[in-house]
Amino acid sequence: MRTGTEKGTGARKGIEIKVGDKLIGYAVSEDLRKRGASGGLVTALLAAALEKGLVDRVLTLKKLNEFEAVPVFTSSVEEVMESAGSMHSVPVNLARYLKPEFFSGKIALPAKPCDARALVERAKRNAVSGEASYVIGLNCGGTLHPETTRKMLETVYRLNPEEIAREEIVRGKLVFFTKDGEEHAVPMDDLEAEGLGRREPCRFCQVKIPTNADLACGNWGVIGEFAGRGTFVEVMTEKGAELLRNAIDAGFAETVPADEKSIAVREKVNKVMLGMSDKRKGEVLAPIEGAGERFEYFRKALENCIHCGACKEACPVCTCGEASKCTAYSSLADSYKMSLFHMVRFLHLSDSCIGCGQCEDVCPAEIPLTSLYQRFAAPVKHEYGYMPGMSDRTPPYFALKLENECGCQHGHDEGYEEGCGGECEGAYREEYKARYREEPEGGCC
Amino acid sequence: MGVEKNESYDEYYPYGVSGACEAGAYEVSDTCGKNSPHWPNDAYGISDTCEVIDACGITDTCEGRDMHGTCNVCEVSDACGSGASHVAGDACEVSDARGTGDACGTCDLHVAGDVHGSGDVHGSGDACEVSDVHGTVDAFETVDTCDTWDTAWEPKIVMFCCNWCSYAGADGAGIGRFQQPASMRIIRVMCSSRVDPVHVFNAFLEGADAVLITGCHLGDCHYINGNEKTLVKFRFMRSMLKELGLEEERLQLNWISASEGEKFAKVVTEVTEQIRKLGPSPLKPKGVA
C-alpha cells in the first residue's frame, strides 16, 4: 500500500482535516484518477472507507453500459473501483434504496443533492440512520433521461451511442467524448429549447452544491493544473472529515488546499446555475390565471391518472409504506372530482417534496407531477422558512405547536401572530439569507 | 269520391253492423289515403271523428305515428315530432318549440333539452326531464317531479365540534334558543385535533360547501395541547386548499367554548352567509345539491 508521502504535490498525511476546509483532492491510483470523474476522488473515498472498515458496505451504481447502471450494495473494494465515472444519464435516487430490508450496518454512498436531501428527510422519519450513513455529496447541474440521451446523440450530435467514452456538462454545454478522443459539444439551452436536454425537475432544482451532505464534491472550481484531474471537496461535517482523513491515511487519496480563485470560481458557477434554475422555476410555476381556473387546472392535469400508485412508491421521501393514508382512504371506485390520493399527497408533500422528479419519471400517464407538487411546496417553504432535506429541523407539519412567524424557537406569551420580540437578534434571518439567498417571510427580526 | 269497399274488412273487422267502423263509413271523406285501413286496435277509436277537418282547421296528414285520441285536436303542423301525445286542453303546438311560453298541459311530455323560462307553468303531474333547467326564482316546484333538488341552493357546511367545548356550545345555542340557519352538519369529536385532513377532504369531496373546525380556546384544551396541534394542521390545510383553488373562507377554524352559545349561533349565521355569497364548492360532485 502506498503511503502517499513520496508521490504527488502535497501529500496530506497527518495534516488536520477540519470541518469547513475547502480542498482539491484526487485519487492516488493513476488508473482511478483517469477513469474516475475529475480525478476519481469520490471513488477513492468510497473504496478507502470500505477497505478500512469505516463502513460495512457501499451503495453505488454498477455500469451496464455508458447510459445505464443499476444501484448495488457492495462490500467489495474492486466493485467500488469499477464503478468509477460520472453518469449523467442515470437519474436514479439512491436514498430510496436505504431501507432496512436492503442492508444493515454502516454505509457510504455518493449522493447528488436530491439524494442527500432525501436521505436527510428519511432520517428524520426514522427510515434510515443518519449517523450510520456517510454521504459523499456530488455537485449536480442536472441529469438526463437515457432515452433522451440516445435521441440527442442520434438526431443532434449524430453520433453512434456505442462510440461514446464519457459525457460532461461544461459551462452550459453538454459535451460527449467519443472513443477516438473527439469532443462534441452543444449548448444545453439549445437542446432544451427543442425539448431535449435535462429532465424537467433538474432545470428548476434549487440545490446544486450538496451542503447538506458530509462532503460536497465536484469539478466546479477545479482550474489550472488540476483541471479534469482533481475534485473540489468542501468538508461539511465531522463525518466528512473522518472520511477524507481515512482515505488519505490509507493512501487512496491526496489533497491540497483550494486557492481563493478556485473557491471564487465555484461560487460563481453555483450562482449562475441557481440563477438559471430560478428563471426556469418562474416559468414552470407561473401563477395560474383566472379566478375559477385553479381547480380546473389541477383537475385537468390529473385527469389521466390511473391510480397506479407508482409516484408514491418512487418518492424517496415517502416512508409511510403500505399503511399510508393516501392509499387507505382512496379508491378507484370513487367518483369524486378529485381523488383523495392526490389531495392527501399534495398536503403531505407540501413540507416534504424535494423536487427530485422520481414521481414524474415513473408516471405511466406522463403527468408533470413534480411541478404540481412543487406548487404546493413553494408557499410552505415561504411561510415556514423551511427547505426539506437541507437541515435537521423537524418538518413543520410534525410540529406540536405553531412556531413563531419568523421561525425562531423563542417563546412568547400570547397569541401566535406575534414574533419573539427580536430576541434572536436577527441571527435567524441572516442564516436563512445565507442558505436560501432570499429574505425570509414575515417576522419580528 | 269513394273508396271501393274492401271485402277483406270483414275478416279483420268483426264490428258487424253495429260497428261504426264500417268500411267506407270513414273513408269517404278520409284524406288519410286510399285504402287506409282502420284496424281493430286502431287508436283512432270508434268515435273517431275522422281527422279530415281537424278542429284546428288544418288538414291532418294523419301520419302513421300519430296517435289520435278521442278528443284529439290537430297536429298538422305540429313540430312535436313522433310519438307526441296531445290531450284535452292542449294548446296547439303549431309554433310550439317547446320552449319558453309553452303553456304546458297537464300531461305534457317534455323531451331532453326543454328549457323552462320564468313564465313557465308547471301543472301537477308534470314529468320534467332531467336536463330541465329551473331558474332559482321558479315558483312552480311544489308538485314538480323533476329533479329532487329543484329548490334554490343552500350552503351545506360540515362542522367538527370538540366534545368538551364546542359541542356543549352548540347545545347552549339550542337551549338558549339562539336562531341560526340550518346549514351545519355537526360531527362531534372528542378533541379538535382528532380531525384529520382526510376527514376534511372527504367532506369536500362528498359535497360540503365549507368545513368548520371548532374547539376549545388555546390553553383550555381538555387534553392540554390538542388544539395547538389542530392549529398547525389547519394552517397546512388552508394553504393546500387555497393553492388547489378553494376559497380561503371554505375552511375555517374557530375556538368556541361551552358557555358561548350565542357566539356559536353567530358564527354559524356569519359563515353561512359568507358561503352563500361564494356559491357551491368547486369540489362538489355533480348531482349533489
Image (cartoon, rainbow, N blue to C red):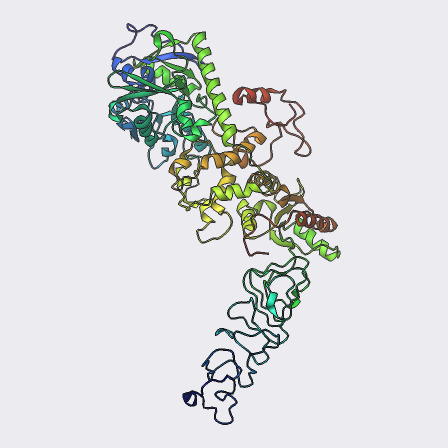
**Eyeballing the image, is A64 above or below B265?**
above
The residue closer to the viewer here, B22 or A43, is B22
> Does the rendering let one see residue A254?
yes
The residue closer to the viewer here, A290 or A331, is A290
Q: Position of residue A403 (x, y in %)?
A: 60, 32
Q: Position of residue B167 (x, y in %)?
A: 66, 52
Quadrant location of the C terminus of chain B in the rendered image: bottom right
Relative side of A187 to A282, left or right: left
The residue closer to the viewer here, B5 or B204, is B5
> Does the rendering let one see residue A391?
no
**Eyeballing the image, is B280 above or below B56?**
above
Relative side of A134 to B120, left or right: left
Relative side of A338 to A5, left or right: right
Which quadrant of the view contains residue A145?
top left
**Eyeballing the image, is A174 above or below A7?**
below
Q: How many marks?
A: 0
Relative side of A155 to B66, left or right: left
> Residue sitting at 63 percent across and 53 percent down?
B156
> Residue sitting at 59 percent across and 25 percent down?
A440
Farthest front residue in view: B1
Q: Position of residue A282 (x, y in %)?
A: 52, 28
Which quadrant of the view contains residue B126?
bottom right
**Eyeballing the image, is B190 above or below B105?**
above
Q: Position of residue B227 (x, y in %)?
A: 62, 42
